[in-house]
Amino acid sequence: MSNVHVVDHPLVQHKLTLMRKRDASTSTFRRLLNELASLMAYEVTRDMPTQAVQIETPLETMTARVIDGKKLVFVSILRAGTGLLDGMLAVVPGARVGHVGLYRDPATLQPVEYYFKMPQEMGERDVVVLDPMLATGNSAAAAITRLKTLKPRSIKFVCLLTCPEGVAALQKAHPDVPIYTAAIDRQLNDHGYILPGLGDAGDRIFGTK
Ligand code: URA
């Protein structure tokens, strides 16, 4: 699959396995998600532009590289995307944050936006869209369609888990958006859950079930 980056680092795979376990507690699940998000942040920022600045070391002046974290926007798809935010911000503390809220219309099954709040000057920014589960792909595609109206410099999508159906749907809608994931599971079930998956990510993050 082109434009799909499976982050197969042993630490990522290990933590993901612990998260999948039915008996992982809410606090364990949340802690692992934070740690995984930081590891995913390394991958998704790998090609971020840097600029040269002059600094003083204790011994002499040198030219060194820095990134402009303020140009980066993490966009959380509510509510589960919020679970990835802290870990991402731990690595890129200067990043801005946007939120998109979507619900599924029970009649049409199409996503309907109920919340959208982004930082100013989106045209100068690189966007990383966050949602732990890329399942049907409907929410991710709708969020990205909306974000594109603001013409950001670039858009990437980060999840923990996806499946062939989710990848195909997002790539069909937005072939230009790279997908970063820790795993591509076997399939989507009839209720829109990923198999074998890890269950409902939102419920597991927030302890709502
Ligand atoms: N959302 C979840 O939280 N889990 C899935 O398996 C699919 C969508």
Image (spheres, rainbow, N blue to C red):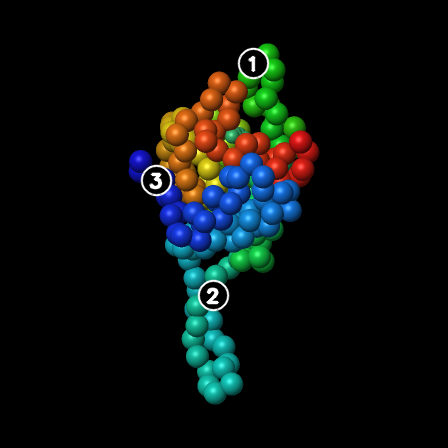
Q: In the rendering, which numbered label is found on residue 66?
A: 2
What SS does tag 1 mark? loop
Which of the 4 image quarters holds residue 173?
A: top left
On screen, 191 above or below 141?
above
Foreground residue among 180 and 56:
180
Residue at left 57%, top 57%?
A: 90
How far across and how far down the image is residue 191, in percent?
52, 20
Foreground residue among 207 and 114:
207
Instruction: Specify which label sits upstream in the sequence, 2 or 1.
Output: 2
Left or right of 69? Residue 64 is: left
Dot 2 amino acid type: Val
Residue at left 41%, top 40%?
A: 183
What SS does tag 3 mark? loop
Dot 1 amino acid type: Thr
Which residue in the protein does label 1 denote? 108
Residue at left 60%, top 47%?
A: 28
Comparing marks 2 and 1, which lies closer to the viewer?
1
Could you tell me how far apart the alpha carbons at marks 2 and 1 are, in whole angstroms? 47 Å
How far across and how far down the image is residue 45, in percent?
44, 53
Instruction: Specify which label sits upstream in the sequence, 3 or 1.
Output: 3
Foreground residue among 189 and 23:
23
- Can see residue 141? no
Foreground residue among 43 and 171:
43
Q: Which quadrant of the figure contains the N terminus?
A: top left
Q: Which quadrant of the figure contains the C terminus?
A: top right
Could you tell me how far apart the alpha carbons at marks 3 and 2 are, in whole angstroms? 26 Å
Dot 3 amino acid type: Asn
